[in-house]
């Protein structure tokens, strides 16, 4: 028998309460309707359904998992580090009641003043891959 990965939150089958922070994160990812389905039914969903619900970003064959992860990591690592950091901070801030917009704006401004931005523009004009340094 082949193992099939499943994903779900089974707190309702165990009599557990689920903390508000976790519920807010789930609702932020999949919306209230899907979050209610996940939380109330305590169902374990297969990869295709979890993907359709927005619980996972990608579904790949198990044998390709490591290659897919390495490829994605390499793709992210090849991008401008300051830009990735600013995007990460901005995405995290969307889950906060009072995000520090000034801090995010400062990170974005740092990107525009960076050597990496100049390198990115040069590389684009020269039709080559950029060599970012995080400065």
Image: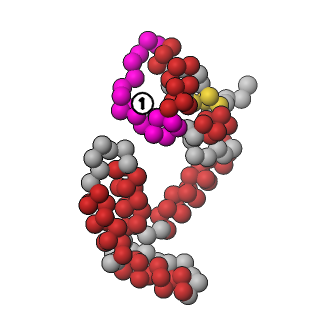
Name the residue at the top extreme.
15
Quarter of the image holding residue 107? bottom left
Question: Residue 94: image x %, image y %?
Answer: 38, 48
Q: Report if residue 19 lies within the magenta region.
A: yes
- Please state if 90 lies on the left or on the right of 48 as rendered: left
- Please state if 67 lies on the left or on the right of 36 as rendered: right
Q: Nearer the viewer, residue 37 or 79?
A: 37
Q: Nearer the viewer, residue 92 or 82?
A: 92
Going 56% across and 25% down the picture, which residue do you hit?
37
- The prevailing secondary structure element of the residues shown in magenta is helix
Going 55% across and 57% down the picture, which residue do you hit?
72
Q: Circle 1 — which element?
A: helix
The mark total stands at 1
Q: Quadrant location of the C terminus?
A: bottom left
Quarter of the image holding residue 127? bottom right
Q: Quadrant location of the N terminus?
A: top right
User: Eyeballing the image, is 117 above or below 72?
Assistant: below
Q: Which residues are magenta?
A: 14-31
User: Eyeballing the image, is 70 above or below 16?
Assistant: below
Going 46% across and 34% down the picture, which residue do you hit?
26
Q: Which residue is mark 1?
A: 23
Going 47% across and 82% down the picture, which residue do you hit?
121
User: Eyeballing the image, is 37 above or below 70?
Assistant: above
Question: Residue 89: image x %, image y %?
Answer: 35, 55
**Residue 47 in view here:** no
Question: Residue 46: image x %, image y %?
Answer: 65, 31
- Please state if 61 lies on the left or on the right of 25 as rendered: right
């Amino acid at each position: 028998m082949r193992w099939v990965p499943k994903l779900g939150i089974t707190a309702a089958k165990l009599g557990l309460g689920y903390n508000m922070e976790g519920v807010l994160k789930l609702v932020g990812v999949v919306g209230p309707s899907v979050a209610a389905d996940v939380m109330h039914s305590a169902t374990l969903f297969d990869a295709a359904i979890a993907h359709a619900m927005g619980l996972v970003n990608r579904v790949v064959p198990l044998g390709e998992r490591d290659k897919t992860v390495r490829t994605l990591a390499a793709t992210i690592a090849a991008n401008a580090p300051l830009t990735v950091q600013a995007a990460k901070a901005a995405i995290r801030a969307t889950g906060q009641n009072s995000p520090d917009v000034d801090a995010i704006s400062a990170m974005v401004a740092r990107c525009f003043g960076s050597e990496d931005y100049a390198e990115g523009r040069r590389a684009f004009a020269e039709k080559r891959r950029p060599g970012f340094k995080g400065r």
